[in-house]
Image (tube, helix red, strand yellow):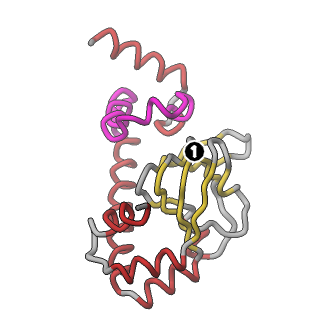
Amino acid sequence: MMHEDILENFRTYVPFTKEEVKDFFGKGKYVKYRKNEVLVEKGDPVSPFIFIRKGCLMTYYSDSKNFNHVIQFGLDKWWTGDLQSFMQGTPSSYTIKAMSDTEVWTLDKNAFESLCAEHPSFERYFRILFQNSLISHQKRIIRNISFSAEEKYLTFVKNFPKLELLIAQKYIASYLGITPEFLSMIRRKLANKA
């Protein structure tokens, strides 16, 4: 059943009861998106907190020249969203787009706060998620300031082994902070070494 896979995922961090998770489904909203549909547009009043049941989402920032900078990819059983917008109730700074057909559960701020207040397990669960997210972002900053482009690409492939088959090269290049042409050069170089 659809809920069992989510319950299993939640329980990898915290021992939830079925009643607690049932409350999550009662407060959350289930939505399906087709490939290339936008879930959140930059400037939207408030971004929800999004749990990806199945699929792939891309979060990106559009600068003043309309160049899109990929911030992150989100895959099955990941949480994503514009955290500042969600927590502070400010307009979203990012666009979040489905890179494949995707199924999500979304929480608005009231539902999130209610879950955490009524169920200490959710408070602990989200604390663990935010800690892991902070660690992951710190590691990415270190990679961005100290790794070569080839090392960044190899780390990306190691961390996201199936994503290259799903995501256009220009988005991967943007995520890595390099041009698509330079990424092509790196891939050719690595293919010749193999």
Q: Residue at x 66, y 62 (%)?
A: 92
| Front residue of 3 and 136 | 3
Q: Residue at x 67, y 39 (%)?
A: 67
Q: Position of residue 118 (x, y in %)?
A: 43, 90
Is 68 placed left or right of 146 in the picture? right
Say whether residue 161 is magenta: yes
In the structure shown, which secondary structural element does the residue marked by tag 1 occupy?
loop
Is 62 placed left or right of 115 in the picture? right
Q: Residue at x 58, y 70 (%)?
A: 29
Q: Position of residue 137 (x, y in %)?
A: 39, 55
Q: Position of residue 158 (x, y in %)?
A: 30, 36
Name the residue tied to disc 1: 101
Q: Quadrant of the C terminus?
A: top left
Q: Quadrant of residue 108?
A: bottom right
Q: Residue at x 60, y 55 (%)?
A: 32
**What span is colored magenta in the figure?**
146-173
